[in-house]
Amino acid sequence: MVLDDLGSSLRGTLDKLQGKTTLSEEDVEEIVKEIQRSLLSADVDVDLVMELSDSIRQRALKEEPPAGTTAKDHVLKIVYEEMVDLVGESTELPLEDQTIMLAGLQGSGKTTSAAKMAWWFSKKGLRPAIIQTDTFRPGAYDQAKEMAERAEVDFYGDPDNDDPVDI
Ligand SMILES: Nc1nc2c(ncn2[C@@H]2O[C@H](COP(=O)(O)OP(=O)(O)OP(=O)(O)O)[C@@H](O)[C@H]2O)c(=O)[nH]1
Ligand SMILES: [Mg+2]
């Protein structure tokens, strides 16, 4: 979530490369520092951040930008590729009947993701429903219900039942 800031802070740093055709070590270091700051404050594992930094440094300084490519585009492509590599493979969501269980640490975005995914599925022509089985956190039922309403998808939950399996 803190990663939302990465785009804007990186854009500022990359804008300084405007018009340049080659990257200096200082340019690359400034970009790497910016990325490190964002990733570390988003609790990304330190070793992973260092690995990513090394790959970006090496590639940005070693790889020749293809003819006609600006320094900015060149480094942007490398950062993009390395970030995609860090995040991992994407998953295709099949457009068919299915049950998806969202599990994760407190506050990691499960309920929000449920609403976003339900909205996405409904735009693809399916008829998704959100089932709230968090019987533990106060307000969880109301939050999920409201988000389902906003996403215009069906919702089920039972605020008087404290057994998720039963629900
Ligand atoms: N910026 C940003 N904030 C998000 C995103 N997803 C969730 N949030 C925020 O993160 C906070 C927690 O999100 P929830 O969806 O309630 O997370 P949860 O995992 O259901 O939380 P619990 O039910 O308390 O365990 C809320 O303030 C959300 O608005 C996201 O993709 N980007
Ligand atoms: Mg939740």
Image (cartoon, helix red, strand yellow):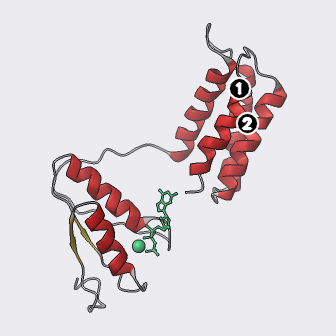
Where ligand 2 lies, by image quadrant? bottom left
Query: Dot 2: few (<14), some (14–19), or many (≥20) neighbours within 10 Å?
Result: many
Of the pair 16 and 56, the residue shown nearer to us: 16
Residue 81 occupies which quadrant of the picture?
Answer: top right
Check whether the beta carbons of the residues at disc 2 and disc 1 lie within 8 A of each other: yes
Image spot of residue 131 (x, y percent): 25, 72
In which quadrant is the N terminus drawn? bottom right
Q: Nearer the viewer, residue 161 or 100?
A: 161
Look at mark 1 in the image and give the residue it sits on. 60
Q: On the rendered structure, is 24 left or right of 121?
A: right
Q: Give the residue displayed 28% in from the left and 50% down from the top.
A: 120
| Drawn side of residue 77 relative to residue 102, left or right | right
Q: Residue at x 32, y 61 (%)?
A: 115
Which quadrant would residue 146 be assigned to in this image? Answer: bottom left
Q: Residue at x 69, y 29 (%)?
A: 15
- Residue 96: image x %, image y %? 16, 51
Q: Quadrant of the C terminus?
A: bottom left
Report the residue marked by disc 2. Answer: 31
